[in-house]
Image: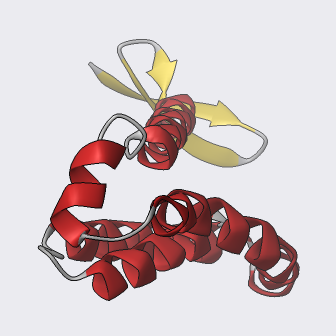
Amino acid sequence: LVQPMESDSQVRFSVGGIELRKRWAFLCAAVQLFSMFVDAVLLTVIVPLSPQYKERFDVSDAAIGLLFSSKAIVQVVTSPLTAKAVDRVGCRPVMLFAMLVLVVSTAVYAVSGDAFGVALAARAVQGIGSSG
């Protein structure tokens, strides 16, 4: 089933006729597409919940608008910094760090309870994670 392949003076392995390198590339692409989907959901998930958030946090419409837009604003501001980091250390470490930041900030947002400041800060940190 696993067969060594000779090409370009490197030994590669084939599983089921597909090189492992191609499977790894497919897996990386699938993870990236899934993270883009989750990022889009995180940006818009707050819209249908806005009336409940207004009642739960007991804040104005403007504050709910700030909660909604804080992720996108921070993402736009931090994207050039992320691009410089990618140029300096490479794409993979920056992407992995950004995914970790996004996961942690989303968990903090999920457990923020009635603390509007914590929810706002978590949304802003989600923007940092999304810029990677």
Rendered residue at 54%/41% (across/down): 36
Q: Nearer the viewer, residue 61 or 37?
A: 61
Q: Quadrant of the N terminus?
A: top left
Left/right placement of residue 55 relative to residue 5 reads: left
Q: Nearer the viewer, residue 88 or 74?
A: 74
Q: Quadrant of the C terminus?
A: bottom right
Left/right placement of residue 34 relative to residue 103 reads: right
Report the coloring of the rendering: secondary structure
Q: Is residue 70 visible?
A: yes
Rendered residue at 43%/84% (across/down): 121
Q: Is residue 59 above or below residue 6?
A: below
- Residue 70 placement (x, y as % from top left): 58, 69
Rendered residue at 51%/57% (across/down): 68
Rendered residue at 43%/40% (across/down): 47
Q: Nearer the viewer, residue 85 or 90?
A: 85
Q: Is residue 13 above or below residue 16?
A: below
Left/right placement of residue 127 relative to residue 61 reads: right
Q: Is residue 21 visible?
A: no
Asked where in the image residue 112 lies, by quadrant, the reply is: bottom left
- Residue 116 placement (x, y as % from top left): 30, 79
Q: So how many labels did they put on this image?
A: 0
- Residue 106 placement (x, y as % from top left): 31, 66
Q: Is residue 56 above or below residue 105?
A: above
- Residue 110 placement (x, y as % from top left): 19, 64
Left/right placement of residue 130 relative to residue 88 reads: left
Asked where in the image residue 111 lies, by quadrant, the reply is: bottom left
Q: Nearer the viewer, residue 94 or 52?
A: 52
Asked where in the image residue 21 lies, by quadrant, the reply is: top right
